[in-house]
């Protein structure tokens, strides 16, 4: 299971712009490298990251081989209601990881 | 209030006395510094979290003997009275691993050893490096100093030539820091992973085209000990980020 680190403000005012940060552990092997015997190292990357806010998708990103290991994503959204933010990563070799965080909107 | 004023005065006079030592953190770009400062952006924290999980598992778990590890990482390498030699934090973890948990030692640069050392080092963040200089460690510190100053490899260079003489200048595009190991284990952007001081030293040795010492070799321990003596009093910022 991949480890993920999420930073969501625990509380916010309604209508406030909040910053969300998501870091996940992944090697992001490009597929372009070779090992010491000259054999190609197969690609192993995260392909899609999504964030949903109370079930509605608010952010989606596609990842490519040029993205560094342990990808870090930071984005903003508007705090509309209390609830849960859910983060999902999926990629090569059936990789999946998910994490969620609660937010209270006043 | 008076105490605070006195502390400020002392701090001011300390810098006026001219401690010219600077950690690798101060040589970094603002962006890399921001990455290290924010625990949600510092990838090394992923290892620290794994380390915490490891710390609480195992039979017996590390946490069943050890409570607070605050300040421990700042004291290593430390002299082990039973082994009659100084040991690094990684070696100390493996002593517990083999003798108390009766398991095979963790591999150098393996996920487990890096995670545990990151978790332990994190608990000493902000504390001054405080390795012991006494009759036991002196011969090893002297040996480390000799290694630091010894020219070696096809380029016939010593650590001191780069890190004392040319620190602050550039080696191709990279800044040459003063070689104060304040942040290990650290996430190196070039490595795209966490690594130990020994990995860094092996990189330097390969760079001057010398035969790198093996992980855990006596020379490694002596060099690490000497570097920590050189950096004594500087604040640990482990697990750090470096370019």
Image (cartoon, rainbow, N blue to C red):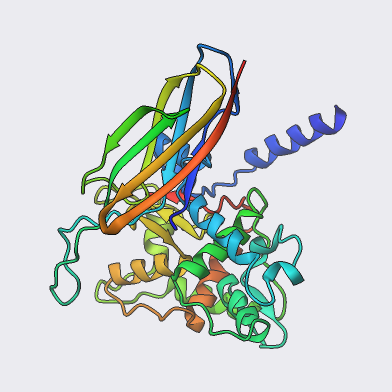
Residue under the point 36% across and 74% down:
B151
The picture quadrant where one finds residue B161 is bottom left
Q: How many marks?
A: 0
Residue A76, position as x, y percentages in the image: 42, 23
- Name the residue nearer the viewer: A27 or B9: A27
Q: Is residue B141 visible?
A: yes
Q: In which quadrant of the rendered view does residue B193 lie?
A: bottom left
Q: Nearer the viewer, residue B230 or A6?
A: A6
Percent x, y of residue A75: 39, 28
Give x and y (percent) for residue B130.
68, 61
Q: Is residue B231 visible?
A: no
* Placement of the N terminus of chain A among the 4 image quadrants: bottom left
Residue A51 left/right relative to A93: right
Residue positioned most to the right? B2
Q: Position of residue B162 (x, y in %)?
A: 37, 60
Quadrant containing the C terminus of chain A in the rendered view = top right
Closest to the observer: B128 or A7? A7
Residue A39 lies left or right of residue B132; in this view the side is left
Q: Residue at x 85, y 33 (%)?
A: B3
Residue A104 lies left or right of residue B196; in this view the side is: right
Of residue B221 and residue B161, the one placed in the foreground of this image is B221
Q: Is residue B105 above or below residue B206?
A: below
**In the depicted structure, whether residue B29 falls above or below residue B51:** above
Residue B94 location, quadrant: bottom right
> In the orientation shown, which residue stands out farthest toward the front?
A55
- Residue extending furthest toward the top: A15
Q: Residue at x 46, y 75 (%)?
A: B108
């Amino acid at each position: 299971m991949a480890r993920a680190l999420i930073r969501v403000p625990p509380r916010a005012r309604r209508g406030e712009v909040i910053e969300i940060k998501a870091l996940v552990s992944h090697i992001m092997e490009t597929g372009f490298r070779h090992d010491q015997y000259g054999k190609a190292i197969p690609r192993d990357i995260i392909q899609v990251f999504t964030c949903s806010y109370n079930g509605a998708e608010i952010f989606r990103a596609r990842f490519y081989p040029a993205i560094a290991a342990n990808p870090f994503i930071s984005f903003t959204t508007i705090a509309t209601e209390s609830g849960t933010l859910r983060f999902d990563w999926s990629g090569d070799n059936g990789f999946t990881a998910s994490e969620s965080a609660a937010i209270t909107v006043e | 209030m008076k105490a605070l004023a006195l502390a400020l005065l002392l701090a001011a006079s300390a810098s006026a006395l001219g401690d010219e030592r600077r950690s690798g953190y101060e040589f970094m770009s603002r962006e890399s510094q921001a990455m290290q400062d924010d625990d949600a952006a510092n990838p090394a924290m992923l290892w620290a979290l794994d380390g915490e999980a490891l710390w609480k598992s195992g039979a017996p778990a590390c946490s069943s003997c050890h409570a607070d590890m605050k300040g421990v990482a700042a004291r290593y390498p430390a002299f082990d009275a039973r082994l009659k030699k100084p040991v690094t934090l990684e070696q100390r973890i493996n002593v517990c691993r083999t003798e108390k948990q009766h398991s095979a030692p963790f591999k150098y640069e393996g996920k487990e050893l890096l995670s545990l050392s990151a978790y332990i080092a994190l608990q000493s963040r902000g504390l001054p490096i405080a390795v012991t200089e006494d009759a036991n460690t002196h011969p090893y510190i002297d040996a480390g100093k000799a290694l630091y100053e010894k020219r070696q490899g096809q380029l016939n260079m010593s650590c001191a030539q780069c890190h004392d003489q040319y620190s602050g200048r550039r080696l191709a595009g990279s800044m040459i820091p003063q070689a104060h190991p304040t942040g290990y284990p650290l996430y190196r952007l070039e490595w795209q992973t966490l690594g130990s001081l020994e990995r860094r030293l092996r990189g330097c040795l390969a760079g001057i085209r010398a035969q790198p010492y093996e992980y855990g070799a006596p020379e490694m321990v002596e060099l690490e000990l000497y570097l920590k003596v050189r950096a004594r009093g500087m604040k640990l910022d482990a697990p750090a980020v470096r370019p």
